[in-house]
Image: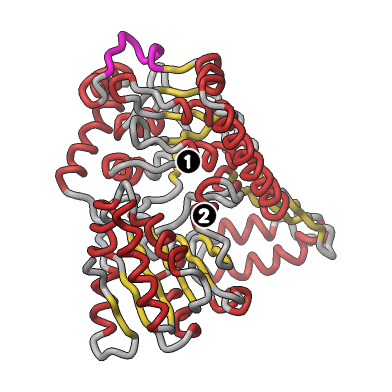
Amino acid sequence: MKLRHLSTAAADFEAEFQRVLHWSAETDSAIELRVAEILADVRLRGDAALLDYTARFDHLQAQSVAELELTRDELKAAFDAITPAQREALKAAALRVRSYHERQKQASGLSWSYVDEDGTLLGQKVTPLDRVGIYVPGGKAAYPSSVLMNAIPAQVAGVPEIIMVVPTPRGERNPLVLAAAYIAGVHRVFTLGGAQAVAALAYGTATVPKVDKITGPGNAYVASAKKHVFGQVGIDMIAGPSEILILADGTTPPDWVAMDLFSQAEHDEMAQSILLCPDAEYIALVSAAIDKLLPEMPRRDVIRASLEGRGALILTRSMEEACEISNRIAPEHLEVSSANPQAWEPLLRHAGAIFLGAYTSESLGDYCAGPNHVLPTAGTARFSSPLGVYDFQKRSSLIEVSEAGAQKLGVIAAELAYGEGLQGHARAAEMRLKK
């Protein structure tokens, strides 16, 4: 395999490193134009447009959008139809995801207030969104884990209505996805997909209710549609290709690291898998493991294209330097494959999720560890966070000024208001001052 090998000691490292990282988030102009047309059409024609696009793109005929809604009984039937092992795995994963997000809510998702020395109450009121929409890919590209990761934190946050949309090309329903919706407590499910589903959630139609926020992954059309409707509704993020960065000190079996690189490369050709390590001999062992294991992988062609196009094995001068480079990359998934991962964790500032130790494969986080697998990509971990309970809540400031507090605050506010030339503000504060 023609896998890129780099060394931070090389004179051309910086230029080669930038080539590895390059990825354009710009959407094809033709996609942007088509998405804008679909959004406008659904906004104008509502259910009729949804039926037309569902017939055209998903080859699914229906007389009404109501026919495209799945009942709770149908979700339960899907849950009953999957194997006992699948049922137990879904239930176990859901339990762990729920437990994690309940702890997250306790730590950062509750209202709070205090009373200052003048008797003025100040605080923050945390309330759930009224209604959210979650987009779930359907057909062959089906991800029940994404249902759990989007719906459960919304439910823990207290959202009273969760609407799920999932395309079912030619009527092909994925039972695991529907079973996950049943376990996660999704309230309504519509077999809709693409930009038209995003439009329905953002604007509402006669049948599909308008939501306050849309979360969940999708193709380029879905990502573009989410970008277009932002402001009308909230969105979680615009996700790029999946990424993994592994910091290795040479103590983990090379086969494990090679397979962890594969775990992201198998998503698609644009996914990125990078290894940072100060041990040249170990990098050679990982490279050999890649060549040995690749032929047995069912998605080997996708993995090969991803690794050759955007992957890299990078020799660093030290683990400290590897941590510095990791912070520059700000990866979606960051594995610290080290005998002592706690020594390096304090140096790591930017990552969607940090997986500590040789036994913590990224794949465990994808499915059942507990933390959310919806993570910032393309370096956006520098300023954004994993999907969480907080994404399904909003915060209102609480201010109840006492009579004594108004005497102190009124003087300060009036002085600043006059300085800004806003006499109405100043006089409103002064009227509450004792003569």
Q: Is residue 434 left or right of residue 152?
A: right
Q: Locate residue 78, reporting x and y percent.
A: 50, 21
Question: On the rendered image, what quadrant is the C terminus found in?
Answer: bottom right
Q: Earlier in the sequence, mark 2 or mark 1?
A: 1
Residue beneath label 2, please? 386
Q: Locate residue 229, reporting x and y percent.
A: 35, 40
Which residue sits at x=65%, y=42%?
98
Query: Would residue 380 be seen by someone viewing this image from the given angle?
Result: no
Q: Determine if the magenta segment contains residue 66.
A: yes
Q: Is residue 334 left or right of residue 50?
A: right
Q: Which mark is residue 378?
A: none
Which residue sits at x=48%, y=30%?
176
Q: Locate residue 222, reporting x and y percent.
A: 32, 40
Of residues 240 and 226, which is closer to you in this image? 240
The span from disc 2 to disc 1 (Cα, nearest Å) is 13 Å
Q: Is residue 262 left or right of residue 408?
A: left
The vertical placement of 1 against 364, above or below, is below
Report the residue that reaches farthest toward the left.
30
Q: Determine if the magenta segment contains residue 369.
A: no
Q: Amino acid at mark 2?
A: Pro
The vertical placement of 362 against 421, above or below, is above
Question: On the rendered image, what quadrant is the N terminus found in?
Answer: bottom left
Q: Which mark is residue 146?
A: 1
Q: Locate residue 166, reporting x and y percent.
A: 39, 29
Which residue sits at x=67%, y=58%?
429
Which residue sits at x=82%, y=58%?
115
Of residues 418 and 25, which is closer to you in this image? 25
Q: Secondary structure at mark 2?
A: loop
Magenta part of the chain: 60-68
Report the residue that reaches farthest toward the top.
63
